[in-house]
Image (cartoon, helix red, strand yellow):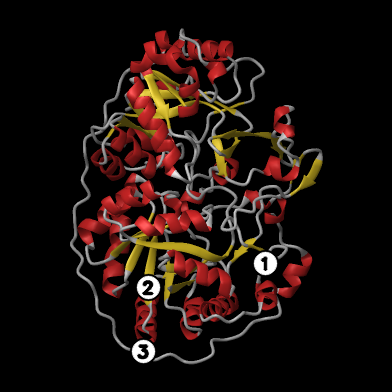
Amino acid sequence: MEILAPAGSPESLRAAAAHGADAVYLGLDALNARRGAKNFDRTALLEAAEICAGAKIDIHLTLNTLLFEQELPAALDVLKTACEAGVAAVIVQDPGAARLVRECAPQLRLHASTQMAIHNLSGVLEAARMGFSRVVLARELTLAEIEAICRRSPVEIEVFCHGALCMSLSGRCLLSSVAGGRSGNRGLCAQPCRQPYRLGGKDGYPLSPKDLSLLTPEWMSALERAGVSSVKIEGRMKRPEYVAAAVDAARAARDGQRPDIRLLREVFSRSGFTDGYLSGRLGRDMFGVRTPEDTRASLLHRGEPQRDLPHEPVRPKPFFHMDIPSPPRHSGRRRPRLRAALSDMSQWSPALSDTCEFIALYPDTLLRLGDTALPYAEKILVREPPASFSDTALRDSLTRLYAMGFRHFLALSLGGIRLGREAGFILHGASPLNLTNSLALEELEKLGLLDCTLSVELSAGRIAHLGGALPRGIEAYGRLPLMVLRNCPVRAFAGCGRCKAGAGAIQDRQKRRFPVSCAGGTAQLYNSDTLWLADKLRDFKGLDFVWLSFVDEDAAGVLSTVQAYKNAAPPPEGMAFTRGLYYRKVN
């Protein structure tokens, strides 16, 4: 089982190599998910390749951010440099980037980043269909779920074994973007989750998990028996001594020895460690912050690599240049059609079908409605839940709904696309697929999408410049989901009864209230303000439809909002509204 170490700088790379890592992952100056790290330029990467060749370890290059249209040529330059350096693999999030790797650098192994939010077997199988040879699974999976995936996976599986945990399913967090325009999907997360919030009448840190650590003989042995190919240490923003200590501990644990956890805590921790989601023990014990004691302890160890490393040449890999296609801009419709996404059956009313092209409902809602919804089946989209960590239940629901007569499915993950296609549904793509460039749209069209919803991190100007024939739309109304959570903070800090009492929300220091709502076995954290674009849709070019997404509105509120969008009305007086990220610069 491979030990994969972070190399956020040349110094950290030397530490990882000197202490016995089997492979390292690193990024060039930009277009990687840790743009705040020191990272590497072309010269430093070629030098790193010599070091790694001498130490007989692989380099995995991170090209794991969403790419805007104008960044595609820069991504080609990154791949050319990667081929010159002879790196072993490229880690990507963006489907457009995956296409560039396949066509321009076919000898580089293609790894699916955890930012792709792959969290079930169907997602792994769909990634394999796209040409990926390894999938980095979401960090929210239990050991049993990982083992079930490994048993049937045709590709290598990689999991995190040590380091920081994100509160949200990776690739599904918009908190940093919305709070300050710094996108976690583009490598500039400002970590607002580590700030204090008020919940249940008390101040605390309900969005800040402890660091993960599975560096014990028991966990490492269990992961190896489960079929995991590689265990990954998080930490490209960390210092070389952190990398050295974590690699030493991982090697010891893999060899059946018990590492010094106290030393790991002293190098870096947040109130100690957690075994994360692997044990399935969710709750308040998973949360922690950096304390003054943690900070003082981390100053104790500033070691150098233990030994010098030999240098020898690397072999470059072939690179085939391609001209980035420039498809004509998508014309769209003069007045985009309205679509409504409902969270609960209480929001449903037959009158919606008169004004909306489609109405999206969760599978369990449709199954409860039963024959009531059948007369409107041609207008109903079966809506994929926020996350399906075991895809068996979703597959069964889709099979039942297709047999009832429903034919359209709204997918928000690679796994959802595969499940919907296998069940025979007509496929539509939701915004969590994070589509930001024309190549990505083309890739998803190849997977069978009839249309797609664009990323909410695209500006109106960038939307207008996207080409291609695939019909597309945007999120135009509602509280945007900022996080998808398997460990609900309300349940952990206040109890589920708080939600039923209407107090299921956290509050920041500016007294903004972020509601939390459960669906499909997960919770979602929603924005404090409501997105409103009814009076601004004329600013958007190239759209075929817009989504109105409802969280806690009643049926009357849903109908009145739909009518307001039909009439291009301004936001209601007194509403705390936002224009989203469509008029802001997202970095």
Q: Seen in the image, is 500 located left or right of residue 225?
A: right
Residue 430: x, y in percent?
Answer: 40, 34
Q: Determine whether 586 is above or below 583 in the image.
A: below
Task: Find residue 389 and report its horizontal and vertical position in percent.
Answer: 48, 46
- What kind of residue is marked 2? Ile
**Residue type pointed to by label 3:** His
Question: Which residue was labeled with disc 3?
Answer: 311
For disc 1, the marked residue is 269
Return the residue nearer the eye: 487 or 314: 487
Q: Which label is found at residue 59?
A: 2
| Mark carried by residue 106 | none
Mark closer to the chain start, 2 or 3:
2
What residue is rendered at 48% in x and 60% in y? 35
Graded by Cα atoms within 10 Å as few (under 14), some (14 to 19) or many (20 or more), the crowding at tag 2 reads: many
Query: Who comes first in sequence, dot 3 or dot 1?
Result: 1
Mark 3–mark 1 distance (CA, rounded to whole Å): 34 Å
Please report the residue visible at 19 percent of the width from the left and 52 percent of the height from the top: 323
Question: Can I make out residue 406 in this image?
Answer: no
Disc 2 and disc 3: Cα gap in Å? 15 Å
Q: Is residue 198 visible?
A: yes
Helix, strand or loop under label 2: strand
Residue drawn at 20 percent across, 45 percent down:
325
Q: Is residue 307 above or below residue 505?
A: below
The local crowd at label 1, few if under 14, some if 14 to 19, many if 20 or more residues have their Cα within 10 Å, is many
Front-most of 473 and 281? Answer: 281
Q: Nearer the viewer, mark 3 or mark 1?
A: 1
Front-lying residue, 554 or 315 = 554
Report x, y in % for residue 523.
Answer: 59, 38
